[in-house]
Amino acid sequence: MASGCDLEVDTEQLRVAANLLQRAAGAVAVDGPPASIEVAEHAAGGSPAGREALRMVTARTLQLSLASRSLAESASRLAELLRRAAEDFDAAEELCRAGG
Amino acid sequence: MDHPVSRWAHLYGLPDPGVPCQDVLDASPAALDHLADSCERVADAVETGYGLIRQALAMLEQAWSAPAPAAAVTSAGMHFRRVAAIGQQAAHAIRTYASGIWPAQSGVDGALTSADRTIVDQGLIPDPPPLPAVHYQAVVGLRIRLVEHLDATVSPISARLDRAALALVPALGPDPRDGLPPVAGNGFGPAPLYDAADSDARNRVRLARDLASSSPVRHAFAASVQRALQRAADAGEVVQLLHYDPFHPAGQGGVAIAIGNVATADSVAVLVPGVGNSPSDASDTLDLASDLTHATERAASGRSAATVVFLDYDVPVSWPGDTVVPPGSSAILPRLVDTASAANDLESVAGGQRLAEFVQRLRSAMDPTAGLALIGHSYGSTVVSRAATVLGPDAGVDDIVLLGSPGAGIGPRTAADYRAVPADHVYALGFPLDPVASPGLDLAAGLINVIPLAAGGPYGPDPNDGFGAQVIEAPSSASVDRHSPWFLSLLTGGMSDVLARSGAGPVANLNQHELANYLSGAALAAVAGVAAGKYAKVPVKSGR
């Protein structure tokens, strides 16, 4: 039965959304971005163009790895915010019911 | 490349097909595929994460009607989606490039195998070919044809791979719209902008092409540079051709040649010679660069050093040594213009800019902890001075040294005006009987100048007098009775003689001014001390 203390937020669903975000964070959290990429200096060819190509390839590979960690952190932070929001809503509802 | 064809290319002055062969064969498509896998794994994981975020968003929109949380999750989802797309695009681009390497390597392999077969079938080994001489000529002809054939076969293969490498730029080049975190260099250290060994190899290929060229201008210039390189190499020096251009600047050509390995040296000096030098006649200057290199190593207790001779500016009065005359010109007019240009510092403005650009490339090829000094002699000191005003404090220049300087040129009024180095890292040395470093030159130059003069005279302020530089105290090693070139006597020695006869002082002589004098004896030790960063070994006085 609905009461005057029912907030228009479904905290259970909020927690489910938070868990999904946490799973998204876990999906992209690789073992951590490598500090460097081990690859032979002339792997893309020994010419200046080949070296430049390798520089771009390794930079982009490392960049993606760093971006993936950043995405994981971002999703995890959002999940945590939603969890806290759910807790705060539950606490507010309890307080209301207790006549506070 | 260790192949007979490479050896013959060098022996007969032909482009070395071993260079493009090696460029292609060094590539590792498997390593690139591995990197593509890595990009793809990230893309797949992020795509999975994106699916979960969409589910989370749907759930959140049902659970909480406030717009801000949904907007935050939507924004995160867009980042996930973008990174997944970038990862897939990168993986695809890398795989496409890697897939082009296999056929390129196969083509090079085939060309080398064919060359090997030709060598055996036609009996082109041993080296030297057996007598009689008529047979020798035939073998040399066959070898030359084989070198040219291999070059014609593999150069297009290498060029195709280069084009494919450059095609990666749109897919992998930095784009701020990506929103990806910045990465310094390539992930395994700052990317070198300029590789000395690579540059040396490529310039030698160009030199070899010019040696085989039907253009007399190219051939003569290349032959003169080759002679200088060979003489230094024969003396047991490590020689690097860091810059080679048969036509620029202003038609006389340009070179930058290092004695020593600039990539590994603990101290690198760039020596800029002045009036009367030519990129086509660099042997004597390279000898002096060797002396400076070894003196610097001694000053630094055996740590390694290198000296780059920079002759890539329009050196006034270079024509006695030049092999190149601008096409369509009579020889006289360019020579007159070339001589008159010594009478002011205008060439130093463009030269200083070229030197500054070269120094930036050079610095990126050096060990970051190595010292770098710019040393200019005569007109070259004005060029160095100009470069030190163009380069900023982050250019990695530690010291500048102005030897036998006619003046610091347009711009700096004192040593404190340089941007590249602080005033206490500006060194100057002018021998008392050097007519170029004396006021007499300004008077002589003023007589033939038709343009407005810079502050302090046609060459700017004297760095040895009231300029605020560290004035080196070292005696001249030269005698006073040697003959001077007439063109410089006209500009300087003649005026000094007039001044001397009128009782103004002792007779100056151009042998006092020669770079060899400034790089010998106590002066050499002092300059080497600066180049090595051993400042305590540099005797200085407060001002001349």
Image (spheres, coloured by chain):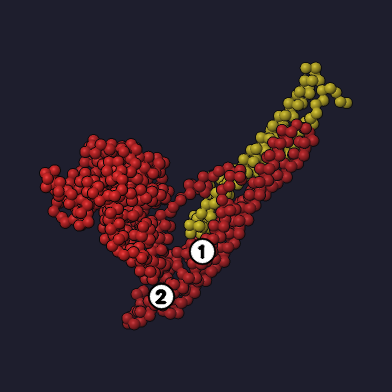
Chain colours: A yellow, B red
**Crowd class of label 2 (few under 14; some 14 to 19; many from 20; radius 10 Å):** many
Q: Amino acid at mark 1?
A: Ala
Q: Left or right: B389 with respect to B92?
A: left
* Camera-side residue of B469 and B323: B323
Residue B268 visible to the viewer:
no
Q: Residue visible at 28% across and 58% down?
A: B336
Q: Residue visible at 30% across and 57% down?
A: B337
- Whichever of labels 2 and 1 marks the residue nearer the N terminus, that label is 2
Q: Residue visible at 82% across and 25% down?
A: A6
| Residue B103, picture quadrant | bottom right
Q: Residue visible at 43% across and 72% down?
A: B147
* Camera-side residue of B414 and B480: B414
Q: Left or right: B70 with respect to B477?
A: right
| Residue B284, picture quadrant | bottom left
Query: What residue occupies the far front of the structure in this picture?
Result: B450
What quarter of the picture does the C terminus of chain B occupy?
Answer: top left
Query: Which residue bears the numbered disc 2?
Result: B143
Q: Position of residue B107 (x, y in %)?
A: 53, 69
Q: How many callouts does the rendering have?
A: 2
SS for callout 2: helix
Q: Nearer the viewer, mark 2 or mark 1?
A: 1
Q: Position of residue B291 (x, y in %)?
A: 26, 53
Against B218, is B407 above or below?
above
Q: Amino acid at mark 2?
A: Arg
Query: Which residue bears the numbered disc 1?
Result: B159
Q: Are marks 2 and 1 in contact (CB under 8 Å)?
A: no
SS for callout 1: helix
**Crowd class of label 1 (few under 14; some 14 to 19; many from 20; radius 10 Å):** some
| Residue A86, picture quadrant | top right
